[in-house]
Image: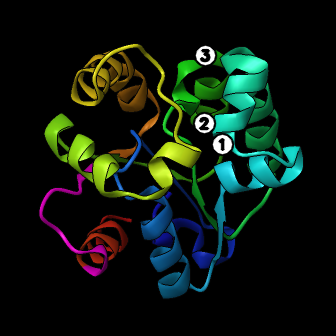
Amino acid sequence: MAFGERGFLSLRIILVGYRATGKTTLAKTLGDELSLECLDADVVLEDKEGFSIAKIFSEKGESYFRELETAVLKELLQKEKIVLALGGGVVVRPENRELLKGQNGTVVWLTATPKTIAQRLSQDAKTEAQRPSLTDKEPLDEVKTLLAQREPWYREVADFSVSTEGKTVPMLAREIIDRL
């Protein structure tokens, strides 16, 4: 939804994309710039469950995690005037894609090359504790495999995409605001 249609009062910006594309960091900046509440679905999920995502995956499995993720998504899509950062795999479930396509707001797909994503993941201290491996592949091969699988789904739900390659967070925020 563009600003001109209903203004900031009903604004909802949702950031999707693979791990380490900058969703959480950018959501905070957009929230500050637009005076909107910033929410990270993964943080909400961890707070509700009382465990890290990695622990949920290891102890209860991916299927259980995906159920929680859908419940949190439904809850957060009830809110208005928010910038929402979603987990990288939220698009895996068809139900979530339908929820994202049916909501009133703008879905922005953040992109980066597999090499950049793998590099960011390796440099992020939170990766091991919060981002469980989803395959038995090496990190770069995992990124390539999962991106190839998920890209059509990101494309399906997104109103537009923004490459995060070689851009600062303020540059990305400005690009998104200009496109809204």
Task: Give the answer, above or below, for where 113 lies relative to 65.
Answer: below
Label 1 to label 2: alpha-carbon separation: 5 Å
Judge from the rendering whether residue 160 lies leftward or rightward of residue 163; answer left or right: right
Judge from the rendering whether residue 119 lies leftward or rightward of residue 10; answer left or right: left
Instruction: Name which of mark 2 and mark 3 comes first in the sequence.
Output: 3
Query: Which residue is found at the position 48% from the left and 38% from the top?
Result: 88
Looking at the image, can residue 64 be seen? Answer: no
Looking at the image, can residue 79 be seen? Answer: yes
Instruction: Name which of mark 3 and mark 1 comes first in the sequence.
Output: 3
Looking at the rendered structure, the kind of residue marked 3 is Pro
Q: Residues within 10 Å of mark 1 (few under 14, many from 20)?
A: some
The residue range painted magenta reads 161-170
Q: Residues within 10 Å of mark 2 (few under 14, many from 20)?
A: many
Q: Are marks 1 and 2 in contact (CB under 8 Å)?
A: yes
Query: Which residue is found at the position 36% from the left and 73% from the top?
Result: 177
Query: Which residue is found at the position 82% from the left and 55% from the top?
Result: 47
Residue that label 3 marks: 94
Residue that label 2 marks: 100
**Residue 163 part of the magenta segment:** yes
Determine whether the residue tagged by mark 1 lies in a helix, strand or loop.
loop
Q: Are marks 2 and 3 in contact (CB under 8 Å)?
A: no
Closer mark to the observer between disc 1 and disc 2: 2
Depth order, front residue of 151/177: 151
Determine whether the residue tagged by mark 3 lies in a helix, strand or loop.
helix
Depth order, front residue of 173/49: 49
Q: Position of residue 149 (x, y in %)?
A: 35, 15
Looking at the rendered structure, the kind of residue marked 2 is Leu
Residue that label 1 marks: 103
Q: Position of residue 154 (x, y in %)?
A: 40, 31
Label 3 to label 1: alpha-carbon separation: 14 Å
**Residue 153 part of the magenta segment:** no
